[in-house]
Amino acid sequence: MSLILENISQEYPGPGGIPTPALDGINLELKNARFTTLIGPSGCGKTTLLKIAAGLTRPTAGRVLLDGEEVSHPTPKIGLVFQEFALFPWRTILQNIEFGLEMQGVKPSERRKQARELLRKTELTGFESHFPRQLSEGMQQRVAIARTLAAHPRVILMDEPFGALDSQTRNSMQEFLLKLFRDEHPTILFVTHNIDEAVFLSQTVIGLSQRPGRIRAEFSIDLAHPRERTSLEFNNYRREILEFLDRERKG
C-alpha cells in the first residue's frame, strides 16, 4: 500500500481576487503500516492537506494516489477521524459503528458481527445499547475510531482527534491508539499541535512551514514502544521539534 501526495498546492480566493496560498508543492509518501504525524505552526495547512488526502477537497495543483490510482473523491479505503466525534445522537453505540457498513449494503447479521468485534477491540463491550450522550468524551472518540475501522480502510487520517480531551484522558487515548496500531497495522497520518503527543505516537514526524505550508523537516523517531515520556531520548526529540517550530514561527 502506498498513499502518495504528489506536488500538492492549494489556493483560496482572497481579498480583491488575489489568491491566498495555503499549501505549496507538498510531496509526501505514506509508507505501509507506518505512523506519520504532521506538525507545524497554526494556519500552515495541516487540516487542508488531510482533507485533500481524503478526497474531500480538490487541490489547486497536484494529485493524490492510492496504490497508483488517483483519489478524486472520498473512498472507504481512506478513513477520517476528526476532533469532533460526529456521532449520531439518535443511534446506539452499536448502530453508530454499523453505519458505514449499512451504507455499503452489508447484511444486518454480518455488520452486527463486525460491529461487536470492533466493540471488543476498542474496549466498549457492554456499551452497545448506550447512546453517545451516555458516554465520556474518551469513549465517544473510541466509538468514532471504531466506526472508521468498520469500513476496513487502507489509510486512516486523524485530525487532532484528542485535542478536546483533558490531559489524563488524552494520555489514555494515545495508549489506546498505539495498541490499535500494533494490533491492526493501519497506515496512519495524524495531525496534532501537541509535540509530546507527536513524539509519543509517531515513527515519523513531518514539519510544515508557515503558510503556505511546505515540508521543511522530517524527524525519524527511533524509539521502541512503549515510550517513556520523561526519558532523555524522548525529550531530545521533543526539544529538536520545538526548536524547529520556534524557527518557523520567527520566519
Image: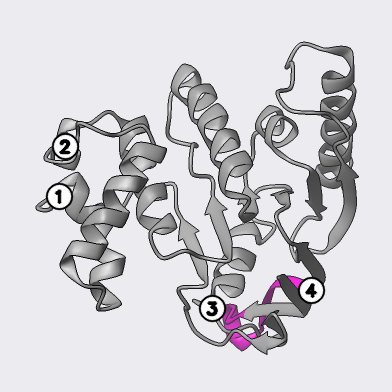
- Calculate the distance from the C-alpha at mark 3 to the C-alpha at mark 1: 26 Å
Residue type of the residue flagged with mark 3: Gly
Label 4 belongs to which residue?
A: 24
Residue 122 sits inside the magenta stretch: no
Measured as percent of width and height from the top left, residue 3 is found at 70, 72
Q: What element carries label 2?
A: helix
Q: Is residue 84 visible?
A: no
Q: Which residue is drawn at 82% across and 22% down?
A: 234
N-term-proximal mark, 4 vs 3? 4
N-term-proximal mark, 3 vs 2? 3
- Calculate the distance from the C-alpha at mark 2 to the C-alpha at mark 1: 7 Å
Label 2 belongs to which residue?
A: 133
Quarter of the image for residue 208 reads: bottom right
Please identify, in this view, whether the residue under mark 1 or under mark 4 is nearer the observer: 1
N-term-proximal mark, 2 vs 4? 4
Measured as percent of width and height from the top left, residue 137 is found at 32, 32
The span shown in magenta is 12-24
Label 3 belongs to which residue?
A: 55
Please identify, in this view, whether the residue under mark 2 or under mark 4 is nearer the observer: 2
Which of 38/75 is in front?
75
Left or right relative to 102: residue 219: right
Q: Residue at x 14, y 49 (%)?
A: 89
Indicate which disc residue 89 carries.
Answer: 1
Q: Are marks 2 and 1 in contact (CB under 8 Å)?
A: yes
